[in-house]
Amino acid sequence: MSATRSPKVSERVAPKAADQQPKKKKRDDDDGPDFATLLRAWIESHRASLVDSLRRLGKQPIGSFFTCMVMAVALSLPMGLSLLLNNVERLGGSWQRAAQISLYLELSASPEQGESLREQIKGMPGVADAEYVGRDQALEEFQQQSGLGEALKELPENPLPGVVLVTPKEVDKPTLEALRQKLSELPKVQQAQLDLVWVERLAAILKLGDRFVFGLTVLLVSALLLVIGNTIRLHIENRRTEIEVIKLVGGTDSYVRRPFLYMGALYGFGAGVLSWGVLAFGLNWLNDAVVGLAGLYGSNFALAGVPVADGLSLLLGAVLLGYIGAWIAVARHLRELAPK
Amino acid sequence: MIRFEQVGKRYPNGHVGLHELSFRVRRGEFLFVTGHSGAGKSTLLRLLLAMERPTTGKLLLAGQDLGTISNAQIPYLRRQIGVVFQNHQLLFDRTVFNNIALPLQILGLSKPEIAKRVDSALERVALSDKTDLYPGDLSTGQQQRVGIARAIVHRPALLLADEPTGNLDPRLAAEIMGVFEDINRLGTSVLIASHDLALIARMRHRMLTLQRGRLIGDGEAGV
């Protein structure tokens, strides 16, 4: 044995700054680093992992770009469909506002009574507007629209009643139904018809669309996690020796995991940015055709782009997915990475 | 420093790596473990590095029981140990400096402190002029010295070496052993697994001899 005094282990081992030992152990203030040193070391460790991950991604720019692109496509599909559905809902909403209650008057009701009724209804709460269509006007419009003009002229008398078209302020179904009931009880009103079937159908279609988007999102998020997991697994394979050495010289699991988590988050960030760009470009490209089509129907409807809040959510979600995918991949493979 | 008390290691396939091994290593001691291939030298080192757990007996390293140590504590145990491998285990995409700095980066030391300690370790293995080279640019002997510098840079209490001179010619082997003795003189316990009996005999340190997992000799080499 050497005669030289050997320092105690605690004197020899350098301060554990980046990864604190989990075992609760009272630390002597004299032999340990202060909080600021620990914090600096922790920040430095994260900075080094981030820079290292960026450097490794930068070394394979084409491979990294295509991985991000695959992820971006997986993100863009559900996000794009969701944005389209939002636009359809917006369009549906403008139609819904035009929902009307048709009051068919008795045949005996005179035009004066019809006008008087219109005035009365217009003053009622919950009514935005009311319009009277007299029997003659109704027949004229019907002749024009049905193409049965000559046949209708052969009828001995006008079979169509006068109509008051009521535009309600509220468009939710219970309110409309209550208003319809109230209007149907007015004198000279034979029938009050509320035609909300198309609104209900549209709502059902939108609900179906929402479910479809949700299902697609779940599927594509799973696919995205697999893509990230597989990419990170390849990075792990390429760095197996390095990981084994790191573990042998005292690297903790979190130290080993850290650069891969940054890598996953960076892939996610790249995918998020690309996806945002793809969606913005795609919606803009589609908008020309939509505006043209809407114009043919006399509408000035146009697709809304990607709202900034949605874009930021997309970016954050992508980063989180990348991080989670990397975490799952590293957790799965960490046990296999024990030094040989 | 190290206490083996009736330590045995049996692998799941039934192979017995070590049979009820008992010995002690004092702090600051220089020790060889020798024996033919399959004698149990590597198993012994793997147990000390907590890469394996003993199946019987008690193994204590710096007061910690390696049979019951938790997985989370293993990295912290390994920070008290330096390891030198026969195949060096260097990272060829990192410079000599960054290879040696790795244990210090794991400890989270500041950049100036890392630079200071790496320079000191390089000086100790006489490679101060190779800082920015890559391991691929170095000779086998120089690579081994880089491996040693990495093993001592964090000032471990115990240095383990597995056949560190296996690939070296006798002159380089003697040179490397000289480096280990220098490190030992500074207070680090050194345990070297080697089957180079001629080299061991020249150095006159304590030698454990293993045969088929059993301790068959414990005494000064060359006596």
Image (spheres, rainbow, N blue to C red):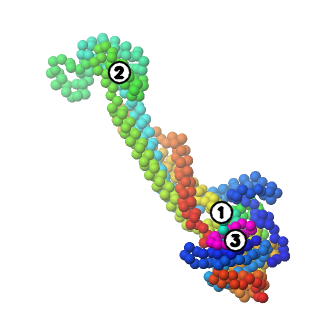
Kind of residue at badge 2: Gln
Residue B68 in the image: x percent, y percent?
Answer: 66, 65
* For residue A70, above or below residue B163: above
Circle 3 chain: B
Of marks 2 and 1, the one in the foreground: 1
Compare residues A159 and B47 and report the one nearer the observer: B47
Provide the secondary structure element on which disc 3 rests: strand
Q: Residue at x 62, y 82 (%)?
A: B38
Residue B152 in the image: x percent, y percent?
Answer: 74, 71
Residue bearing mark 3: B59
Kind of residue at badge 3: Leu
Mark 1 surroundings: few (<14), some (14-19) or many (≥20) residues within 10 A: few
Closer to the N terminus: mark 1 or mark 3? 3
* For residue A296, above or below residue A317: above
Question: In the visual, does B213 lie left or right of A76?
Answer: right
B51 inside magenta stretch: yes
Q: What span is colored magenta in the figure?
A: B48-66
Question: In the visual, does A159 lie left or right of B50?
Answer: left
Residue bearing mark 1: B70
* For residue B14, above or below residue A279: below
Compare residues B89 and B118 and report the one nearer the observer: B89
Q: CA distance from mark 1 to mark 3?
A: 14 Å
Circle 1 chain: B
Q: Based on the displayed image, in which of its 4 quarters is residue A245 positioned?
A: bottom right
Labels 2, 1: one chain: no
Question: In the visual, does A272 lie left or right of A299?
Answer: right
Circle 2 chain: A
Q: CA distance from mark 3 to mark 2?
A: 89 Å
Of marks 3 and 2, the one in the foreground: 3
Residue A181 is labelled as: 2
Provide the secondary structure element on which disc 2 rests: helix
